[in-house]
Amino acid sequence: MPRSLVTIDLGAIRWNARTLAARVAPAELWAVVKADGYGHGATPASHAALDGGASALCVATVAEGVELRGSVAETRIIVLGPTADEDVRAAREASLEVTATDERIPDGLPVHLKLDTGMGRWGLSELVSPPRTVVGFMSHLATSESDRGFAREQLGRFLEATAPDAGRAVRHIANSAAALDFPEARLDAVRCGIALYGIDPYGRDAARFQLRPALRWESDLEQVKCLGPGESTGYGRRFVATAETWIGIVPVGYADGFRRDLSGTEILVAGEPAPVIGTVSMDAVAVRLSGRLERGTPVTLVGDGVTLEQHAQVAGTIAYELACGIRTSPGRGTRVTRDD
């Protein structure tokens, strides 16, 4: 039997795509479904996004694109990461569009030239003379969520460098944050990943952009016990009871993606907030209860107002990392998709 259940609401992804497409129009919405759709399932998320108005799909690697092509026959699939020489043939056979991040431009493939305008990762320092196979020009914003001034500098560099080719190829630089809140960066197309799944790229509340979380994570209490004064739970005795304290043990831990640094966050037990106490183990986590509850009482780790953004604040990370880290496998957890 599974220890927990992850449910993906495809209706929410469809809604988010529709909301984003309307917000960025007349720019196209390109759905980023890399990393297995940020942990939501690349194939079902792709179909939901396309149904909601996305016109293309974006992945990180040729392997991801080839796998996706098996279920998405006609849609444009753009590989955002660099393409190794040995992957060019596979990309060609799968009719993928690839990204050139240096002077090596693959033959016989639609290519997007990537310009490094300030991210300091993949990309050309300056654009080469584009061959006929170039269908797009792109860059990546480093601070769209935190420093709009630097983002405008990047946009300015990009627009200046690509001005001679404006209109002959698609220009795209905006990620989720820029698509939502930086209109001048939308250009011809935007690449939305995290917002597509109903998660705020700013780490606050996606509902302010009319976006709906697509991921729900549930489990139950596997054991309930009462700690006496001086008794503890978990490795390192990080929680020691000072009075009689009821606790519940949930069969989920960092091996499932509920990270060790989520000690102190809140989840729901029987619909009521319950703080995570002690050290998160590989396969279990303890929560403090308001009183005695029965084994099997439902637990909500994400959902019903408990968000990945809130957990990320406790862990000192971003919700992207938490979403990508939730793991399901036989005997450990199950992921299902719901289409409302």
Image (cartoon, rainbow, N blue to C red):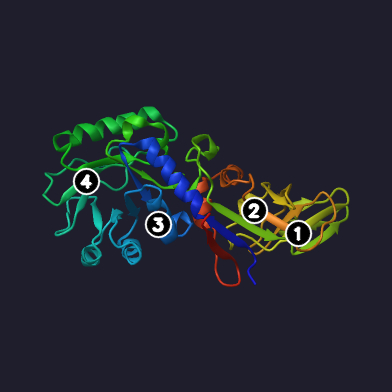
- Judge the density around disc 2: few (<14), some (14-19), many (≥20) Cα neighbours within 10 Å: many
Residue position for label 4:
136
- Residue 237 location (% of width, % of height): 75, 55
Mark 1 is on which residue type?
Thr
Q: How far is disc 1 from disc 4 in space, using C-alphas?
A: 53 Å
Mark 1 surroundings: few (<14), some (14-19) or many (≥20) residues within 10 A = some
Which x, y percent locates residue 108? 14, 60
- Residue with the mark numbered 3: 47
Q: Identify the mark nearer the N-term, 1 or 4.
A: 4
Which numbered disc, 1 or 3, marks the residue closer to the eye?
Answer: 3
Spatial CA distance of label 2 from label 4 is 41 Å
First of labels 1, 3 by sequence position:
3
Using the numbered discs, state the Cα–Cα distance from disc 2 to disc 3 in whole angstroms: 26 Å
Residue at point 26%, 30% (across, down): 156
Cα distance between the residues tagged 3 and 4: 24 Å
What residue sits right under mark 2 in the picture?
301
Please report the residue visible at 34 percent of the width from the left and 53 percent of the height from the top: 57
Q: Earlier in the sequence, mark 3 or mark 4?
A: 3
Amino acid residing under circle 2: Leu
